[in-house]
Amino acid sequence: MHIGVPKEIKNHEYRVGLTPSSVREIVAHGHRVSVETGAGAGIGASDDAYRAAGAQVVADAATVFSAADMIVKVKEPQTPERALLREGQILFTYLHLAPDPEQCAELVKSKAVCIAYETVTQRGGGLPLLAPMSEVAGRMSIQAGAFCLERAHGGKGILLGGVLALLALGLNLIFGVIDVTWICYAELVMLGMYAMYFMVQYYGISYFIAAPFTILLVAALVFIGGVAVFFGVPRERQAQQSGA
């Protein structure tokens, strides 16, 4: 099969359908790959890197579309790209057709075989090509929110998430507890959240099993930490805290 990788032309899209390592793998299995010049510039992959991987670098998108049996992209084809599709040609990319009826109509008219990444489904019902992008979007939302909260960007100068040390200091002043202990407790809670995420996302464990297990795990670690702190604090200081 002849696979084509055009340069993404959607505004602010810097990704590329195939990396040089992916091209090397495809060529090793007997397929041909054509890459539009500059397609990998956004990820730091030069034309020479694609040539070294076994791809043919061509001058423009029209050459890629005309020669390839399958087009591999990242984002939905823009209007000039949709005009280059032909009957029977395979298009493999994110499409997100629901909010874009114009694109949907033009893809149907082209009679190309269009496969959307976001609809590829595993036997267990998972969406392996959509899940990582959803994770990226979720993480980016926090980053974008933090950016907008900065005073220099029109926000109120709020540090997203706060500062655990300040929370612990406040508790120390009010209750006379050891501030480092509360920081450790907060870190244990975050550790539990990560543990539940990996159990559900990577091992397919149900939330109904992962959540109670995580709660018990964090509770056990907090108990162990509390015992360690209690016996680790000098008796004189414990007596001072009790007297206070």
Image (spheres, helix red, strand yellow):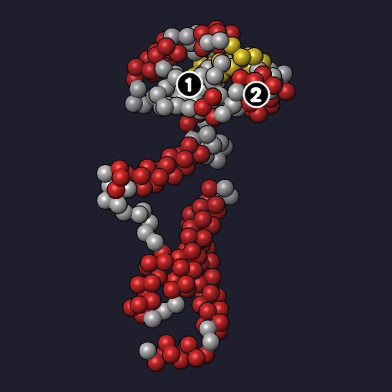
Observer-side mark, 1 or 2, equals 2
In the rendered image, the quadrant that contains the C terminus is bottom left
The one of 37 and 190 positioned closer to us in this rendering = 37
Q: Could you give the CA–CA distance between mark 1 and mark 2, rounded to whole angstroms?
A: 18 Å
Contact, mark 1 vs mark 2 (Cβ under 8 Å): no
x 36%, y 26%: residue: 98
Q: Which mark is residue 8?
A: 1
In the rendered image, the quadrant that contains the N terminus is top right
* Residue 54 vertical placement versus 142 (above, below): above
Callout 2: 10 Å neighbours few (<14), some, many (20+)?
some
x 35%, y 54%: residue: 159
x 47%, y 40%: residue: 136
Percent x, y of residue 123: 57, 37
x 52%, y 31%: residue: 120
Q: How many marks?
A: 2
* Residue 167 vertical placement versus 95 (above, below): below
Mark 2 residue type:
Ala
Q: Element under label 1?
A: loop
Taking 124 as reference, is 103 left or right? left
Percent x, y of residue 15: 51, 28
Quadrant position of residue 29: top right
Q: Element under label 2?
A: helix
Percent x, y of residue 203: 58, 50
The one of 223 and 229 positioned closer to us in this rendering = 229
Q: Is residue 116 visible?
A: no
Mark 1 residue type:
Glu
* Residue 70 vertical placement versus 122 (above, below): above
Percent x, y of residue 118: 47, 31
| Residue hosting label 2 | 49
Q: Which mark is residue 40?
A: none
